[in-house]
Image (tube, rainbow, N blue to C red):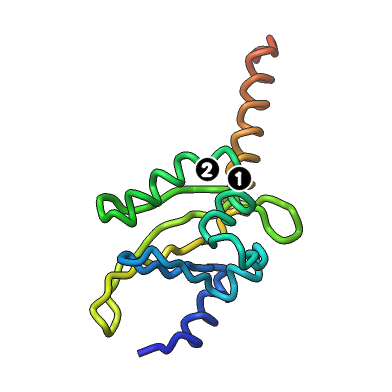
């Protein structure tokens, strides 16, 4: 079985960061890779509130809070595409999805994976934009073919 260090290294190679959440106490710990991406939260603010107010793009805050509360109450899984503000103040797309597990003390935990999907979102936008321009150009031209 993989230990935490090996797992961290594998996930970091695939640009996947994660949170561990104790579903009983609602305590959150960030992986080193997540902290390297978004920075270190101040000690006087909860990790979750720092994330909501400083890292998560404002357009996703309400839906994410509702989904997170549903996850921690055990009623629903969390699977969303969101934009996060990195340490360099640029926003990047991530897919956030959860896994549930029990640790050696039989405590329910959730692991939220943050998978970097920024390049695929940019590629998707480029394809959609090009298709729009090609279609508009074809509709505006009145050329025909003669035999």
Q: Residue furthest right?
A: 88
Give the residue pinned by disc 2: 61
Residue 10, percent from left and from top: 51, 80
55 displayed left or right of 88:
left
Q: Are marks 1 and 2 in contact (CB under 8 Å)?
A: yes
Query: Which residue is painted at 64% across and 52% down in the image?
Result: 54
Q: Secondary structure at mark 1?
A: loop
Q: The N terminus lies in which quarter of the figure?
A: bottom left
Tell which of 59 and 7 is nearer to you.
Answer: 59
Categorize mark 2 by other alpha carbons within 10 Å: few (<14), some (14-19), many (20+): some
Which mark is on residue 57?
Answer: 1
Which mark is on residue 5?
Answer: none
Q: The C terminus lies in which quarter of the figure?
A: top right
Up-down: is 60 above or below 146? below
Up-down: is 84 above or below 25? above
Residue 50, percent from left and from top: 59, 56
Up-down: is 45 above or below 128? below
Tell which of 88 and 6 is nearer to you.
Answer: 88
Q: Secondary structure at mark 2?
A: helix
Residue 39, percent from left and from top: 67, 65
Query: Which residue is painted at 30% across and 80% down in the image?
Result: 103
**What's the CA distance linking mark 1 and mark 2?**
7 Å
3 displayed left or right of 147:
left
Tell which of 28 and 59 is nearer to you.
Answer: 28
Query: Which residue is painted at 30% across and 66% down in the image?
Result: 24
103 displayed left or right of 33:
left
């Amino acid at each position: 079985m993989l230990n935490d260090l090996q797992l961290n290294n594998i996930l970091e190679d695939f640009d996947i960061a994660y949170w561990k959440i104790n579903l009983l106490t609602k305590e959150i710990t960030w992986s080193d890779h997540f902290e390297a991406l978004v920075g270190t939260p101040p000690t006087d603010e909860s990790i979750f509130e720092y994330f909501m107010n400083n890292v998560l793009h404002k357009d996703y805050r309400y839906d994410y809070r509702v989904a997170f509360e549903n996850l921690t109450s055990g009623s629903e899984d969390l699977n969303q595409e969101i934009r996060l503000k990195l340490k360099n103040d640029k926003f990047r797309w991530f897919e956030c999805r959860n896994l549930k597990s029990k640790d050696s003390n039989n405590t329910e935990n959730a692991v939220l994976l943050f998978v970097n999907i920024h390049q695929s979102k940019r590629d998707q936008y480029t394809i959609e934009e090009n298709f729009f321009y090609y279609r508009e150009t074809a509709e505006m031209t009145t050329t025909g073919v003669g035999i």
